[in-house]
Amino acid sequence: MTAKVLITTAIDYVNDVIHIGHAYQKVLADCVARYERLHLGNDNVYFLTGTDEYGTTNEKAAAKRNITPKEHVDEISGLDKKQIDSLNVSYNRFIRTTDEDHKKIAQEFFAKSLAAGDIYKSHYEGLYCEGCESYKTISELNESGQCNLHPTRQIQKIDEEDYFFRWTKYQSFLLELLQNERFVLPEGKRKEMVAFVEQGLKDIPVTRPKYKVTWGIEAPNDPEHVIYVWFDALINYYTAGLQNGFWNDETNIVHFLGKDNARWHVLLWPAMLKSAGLRIPDTIYVHGFVNLNGQKISKSLGNIIRPDELVAQFGVDPVRYYLLKHGPIIDDVNISLDHIKEVYNSDLANGLGNTVARLAKMAEKSGLKFELKSFGSEIFSENWAEPFKDYRVDVALQNIWKLLSEVDKHINENQPWAITDQDKLKTVLTYEVDQVRKIALLIEPYIPTTAKQIQEILGKEIIKSSAPLFPRLQ
Ligand SMILES: [Zn+2]
């Protein structure tokens, strides 16, 4: 059993402020981090998120605004952090690739790979999408010769001297790594990655010449080059892991990311680590995308909603609950404001909120005392939590709601309001109160604020009824 866990989200590229499409990944990783803290203890969990800040896109955006790249990325990174904070995400560090320690560690990493003979100078001629900040082949473009993810951007033709990474050298290493069924979850994504490696990898440029891109970390071996933004960005996980004692063999390292980032994380990152003589992550969890009202979320469609707008409308816990229950844990999902409202009313207002209110009212009316019971951390290893082993927060949440409906059933069958025998009433209500006290602990990783409120309401010997936790939405 691993004693420590490092959990990361992808770091967001600061070409724009994050929207609700990005919110799922933050909340998913946060739920797992909070669960692991309850399970393993705070000191054994490190949770990392942040922003990816170099590259041509940011350099150009800053020039357009007549400010420095650093001023531009400071602003967007700050706005991203505000969005993430609005979702009550409990990161240990919000890393920025412009942080001094990261710059130093990224250069040291590059130097290790260079010393291993895996970085060499050559000529690159090809295509580049500045939206993806990545090299493209003709076959990856659409019929009009544009990137599918950035159809409004002009594809750049690149012809330059770069330093290349010997990706091809790690092809068989990657195939072997992909034999491990835990290395990429879910299973379908692992198979996709195997198929991609089997097509054959190509060595990839990992620097850009300064006369074209200045906004980057200088290559340690050549002051005329900056490190390619993806090569530097992936190293952020190692920077924070190393600095805090979480990049070692006692740590289970788990990266959460969206399907658009899978190749970089599953294929390039482990090859880079192997080249630098460093340990490989244990699991890369790849989730799907969120669509809104049946459409892709994008600036050009004008349908962007920011996380804080959703939180202002529904409250932070209802947004977290909804995403964790209905988010794209495997495949893409479609969401709508109507559906969020519907789930809020059925699961939270009529469900959890109603059970707590009913029980507190009966407990108050009974005039009885409900001795406090302490639950040990073993409740986080019970059957309901089994799906956490595969990061299926949605299935574990369904298990918690089954426990809740069992309490409802118990209340309806035993009808405490009609019991006249005080001893029997005490037995029935004590069981029900204790069950909901326990549920209030289990929901902490999902809806931490509500969990504390319920613990407050029911965590007393003399229980008093309280205002509804989730007023019904019309
Ligand atoms: Zn693109």
Image (cartoon, rainbow, N blue to C red):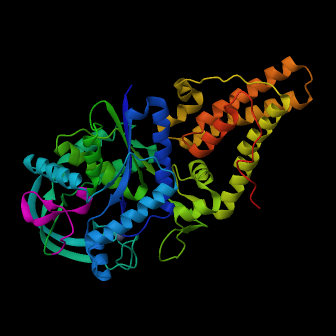
Query: Where residue 456 appears, x then y in whole percent?
Result: 65, 37
Q: Quadrant of ligand 1?
A: bottom left
Q: Quadrant of residue 438?
A: top right
Residue occupying image coordinates x 79% and y 26%: 429
Would you place residue 23 above or below residue 385 in this image? below
On whether residue 135 falls in the magenta region, the answer is no
Would you place residue 143 above or below residue 132 in this image? below
Residue occupying image coordinates x 17% and y 40%: 277
Residue occupying image coordinates x 10% and y 46%: 116
Q: What span is colored magenta in the figure?
A: 212-232
Q: Quadrant of the N terminus?
A: top left
Residue occupying image coordinates x 57% and y 26%: 379
Q: Quadrant of residue 293?
A: bottom right
Query: Where residue 27 appears, x then y in whole percent?
Result: 50, 50
Query: Where residue 187 appears, x then y in whole percent?
Result: 45, 43
Would you place residue 15 above or below residue 104 in this image? below
- Can I make out residue 136 in this image? no
Query: Where residue 155 appears, x then y in whole percent?
Result: 30, 77
Q: Quadrant of residue 457?
A: top right
Q: In the shown orientation, is residue 128 left or right of residue 9?
A: left
- Viewer-side residue, 365 vs 292: 365
- Can I make out residue 323 in this image? yes
Toward the top, the furthest residue is 423
- Viewer-side residue, 446 vs 288: 446
On whether residue 231 falls in the magenta region, the answer is yes
Q: In the shown orientation, is residue 83 left or right of residue 100?
A: right
Q: Quadrant of the C terminus?
A: bottom right
